Amino acid sequence: MSAFLGLVPQYPSPTLEPPPPYGSTSSQLRPLRHRRPASSLPSTYTPYPPDAPCLPNRTMVQGFEWYCPPDFQHWRRLTKIIPTLAQLGITQIWIPPACKASWKTGNGYDIYDLYDLGEFEQKGSRKTKWGGKEELQQLVAVGAQYGVSVLFDAVLNHKAAADFKEPVLARRVDPKDRRVVLDKKPSEIEAWTGYDFPGRQETYSPLRWSARHYKGIDYDDLRKANAIWKFEGKEWSEDVDEENGNYDYLMFADIDHQHSEVKRDLFHWTWWLKSELPQLGGLRLDAIKHYSYSFVRELLGHIDRHVSPGPPGSPETWFIVGEYWREDSEFLARYIEFMHHRLSLFDVQLVSNFFRISLASEHLQSSAPGITYGSPDTDLRLLFDDTLCVWKPHNTISFVVNHDTQKGQSLETPIAPFFMLLAYSLILLRANAGIPCVFWSDLYGSFGVTSTSTPSSEDAASPQDTPLPNPQHWKPPMCGGQVLPKLMLARRLWAYGTQHDYFDYPHCVGFTRTGHYSQSGGAGVACVMANWWEHASKRMYVSVEHAGEVWTDLLKFAPGEVVIDEEGWGVFPVAARSVAVWVSREAEGREGVDAFELDTDVYGFNKRQQEQAYESQRGPAVEEEPEDWMVAARGAAAEYLAMTGSD
């Protein structure tokens, strides 16, 4: 049993300190299940001293969706919209895996070569699906110029699309319990584990991967059979998630992180990545539940010592966020502690709560069994029950949707449409919900589950050879893309100061931020939301500093005005199954927010429509016969060039 069972984290989590020395023993992280209810949050929360300046809020955006078109143009798109994202308050952008995938249209989670950022002719193209190395470098540089740090999605768990197969002795294991070996004796299989990287050769790294660098694979080419094969002489890491008995193996060729050559190469890769992208802001570590916790801690120590040394939280220090998909926030909190609070994790439980409560709320006032007024499945007071931001608010990334939870993906977690803005209001405007991450599709729309043709060319100068995104498959963002940006701007400008919670009724909750003198003149914000089929209101305190101010709903879902009384209170209405965000109509920056309109046409649909309309007005092009004088002039010019020998 791990010593971590004796660690009971306090709320709020302590200020980050330099991590203790790395290299101690690995943790099994098997805590007894303990849930922390939302009621453990203080009703009044002051995140920083009111007499000291506070830093601007940080906000992350996921700069892609699973179904982005494979047109090699995405880095250029992101670079173009960086100024707008910065205006919206974005401080970090999480980009998709930028390394060469198993094929030119792959999203990068089917990782082939870590050292090919779209530079070498491999797997069908030089560029990755997202673009070329030079375009990536420009994106990172422009992001740094505007204060938007780029987070690189690092896929270090596996490799795919090997260059050749090898004979390997292996045994099958039970896919539902990988600790159970099904074969008494090993047999020889043909495994796709050989990587020569013919396009790159030994540029940047001399390591050519082979079967000795892996623990297992899911396909035997000799028998043309799928199974989970564990290589003879290899063992799964013990310090991984215990789902399926032992969840070391996930997919493709499973990397052995304890192999000395592997560890040396991966550590070197982080240093190389910094040298190629000097202004890179950090990493998003993919699928960390599937490989050794002790390796992750060693990797973080290596990064802090040799890649981006500096005090925690400084701009020079890489920001690290890990993807650990588990609805057990105590477990994730202890994982963060094992990593010396050096990384953040996504709040999986919060998304699960959004999913459960939002979908159950769809059945309120219906005949669905158990779905009644005040039932636990529809109780807004329970939204933050056992969430990671209750356990570790300083090491949490909160989100509503990401590429894994959107429709058609393995972790699909649908949120009721009416509830989307409620969820975003909670993660964007609250003081103790970690760093919020806004999803690409909620800002710029989605192509959904559609078939996309493989481009025949990656040449950006030849659009006729590179198929453009098909607007027939595109689904616009929620509310036309014009409401979520206002929530983001509200976070950037006014979501500061002491927070007062009013989570006192099951179907109508609210909170206020009193504002801080160092941000936007001290303007505050009041948020109230309901999931019942009737309008409601809530009396909330916004501080005496705002007495006499007239507040209106920024989102324009709730009409009317609220006058703050002399004691700092107001009664804030909300429409049925809606959210209202109340801000003083004289708040600093309010006029600009009211007038702001996001250009969601990142794929150029409007421009193409204008060009097509212009061409239709001109009519079809007609090849005209040249006049006689033109023919004579061309002939004279040709004769002159022939005499002089000019090109």
Image (tube, rainbow, N blue to C red):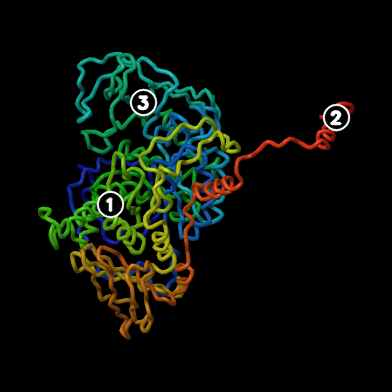
Count of marks placed on residues: 3
Question: Against 343, is 42 above or below?
Answer: below
Q: Amino acid at mark 3?
A: Tyr
User: With 460 as the anchor, is 252 left or right in this view?
Assistant: left
Secondary structure state at the residue bearing disc 1: loop
Image spot of residue 423 (x, y percent): 30, 58
Q: Is residue 113 above or below residue 348?
A: above
Looking at marks 2 and 3 on the same chain, the residue that comes earlier in the sequence is marked by: 3
The answer to whether the residues at label 2 and label 3 have Cβ atoms under 8 Å apart is: no
- First of labels 1, 2 by sequence position: 1
Instruction: Give the labeled residue for mark 3.
Output: 214
Q: Nearer the viewer, residue 406 or 109?
A: 406
Task: Decide: is 597 above or below 608.
Answer: below
Position of 348 with respect to 152 (left or right) is left
| Cα gap from disc 3 to disc 1, whole angstroms | 38 Å
Please state which of residues 139 and 254 is positioned toward the viewer in this rendering.
Answer: 139
Q: Which residue is mark 1?
A: 415
Q: Residue furthest bottom?
A: 566
Q: Residue 69: horizontal and vertical position, in percent?
A: 45, 39
State the image coordinates of residue 529 (x, y, percent, origin top left): 27, 65
Q: Are marks 3 and 1 in contact (CB under 8 Å)?
A: no
> Residue 641, which numbered label?
2
CA distance for labels 2 and 3 = 65 Å
- Look at the numbered disc 2 and give the secondary structure of its residue: helix
